[in-house]
Image (cartoon, rainbow, N blue to C red):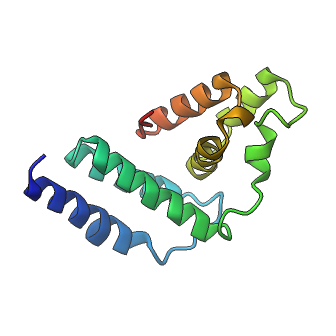
């Protein structure tokens, strides 16, 4: 990757995406999250590389944390963890109903403690995000 592409990734991620959404505090069920995700897709489509995806997903996660009080104990992440009393099928069904921000929150929790989640649950989260145009890099 050349310097101009790196510069473009940072410019588009920060100046276009981040500055547009940084002061928005969207409720969890807001329909405007679809707009945020569409902007993420736009940046990722323009700069289709691992670096861009990591930066934009980190910014998206930051927006989620700001909107919901810096994360805290996320009941939805716990609900689909091994600690939950739900069956594997119930966890997978729960994930199917999660919005982008909750899916990203669970992924962040998974990254911090992969042993807390069944691989099938994480796979389903990846599929749900892919359906929304967001690809995870593992």
Picture layout, residue 53 above or below residue 66: above
- Using residue 51 as the reference point, say whether residue 81 is left or right of it: right
Residue in view at x 76 percent, y 30 percent: 91
Mark count: 0
Residue 15 position, x and y percent, is: 27, 72
The residue drawn where x is 80% and y is 27% is: 90
Q: Residue 73 location in percent, x, y?
A: 77, 58
Q: Nearer the viewer, residue 90 or 119?
A: 119
In this view of the protein, which residue sits in the foreground, 110 or 100? Answer: 110
Which residue occupies the foreground of this view, 17 or 84?
Answer: 84
Indicate whether 6 appears above or below 63. above
Residue reaching furthest bottom? 23
Q: Is residue 14 left or right of residue 68?
A: left
| 94 shown above or below 26 | above
The C terminus lies in quadrant? top left
Indicate left or right for 136 with 126 as reference: left
Question: Could you tell me which residue is drawn at 45 percent across and 74 percent down?
Answer: 22
| Residue 87, image quadrant | top right
Question: Residue at 65% across / 22% down in the picture?
Answer: 120
- Spot the residue most to the right: 85
35 displayed left or right of 99: left
How far from the left and from the top, in percent, is residue 94?
74, 35
Choose top left, top right, bottom left or bottom right for residue 68: bottom right
């Amino acid at each position: 990757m050349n310097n101009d592409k790196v510069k473009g990734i940072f410019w588009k991620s920060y100046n276009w995406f981040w500055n547009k959404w940084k002061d928005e505090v969207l409720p969890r069920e807001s329909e405007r999250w679809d707009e945020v995700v569409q902007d993420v897709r736009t940046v990722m489509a323009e700069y289709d590389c691992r670096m861009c995806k990591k930066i934009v997903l980190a910014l998206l996660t930051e927006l989620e944390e700001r909107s919901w009080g810096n994360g805290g104990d996320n009941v939805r992440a716990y609900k689909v963890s091994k600690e939950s009393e739900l069956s594997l099928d119930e966890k997978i069904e729960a994930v199917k109903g999660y919005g982008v921000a909750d899916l990203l929150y669970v992924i962040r929790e998974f990254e911090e403690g992969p042993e807390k989640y069944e691989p099938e649950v994480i796979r389903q989260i990846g599929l749900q995000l892919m359906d929304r145009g967001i690809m995870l890099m593992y």
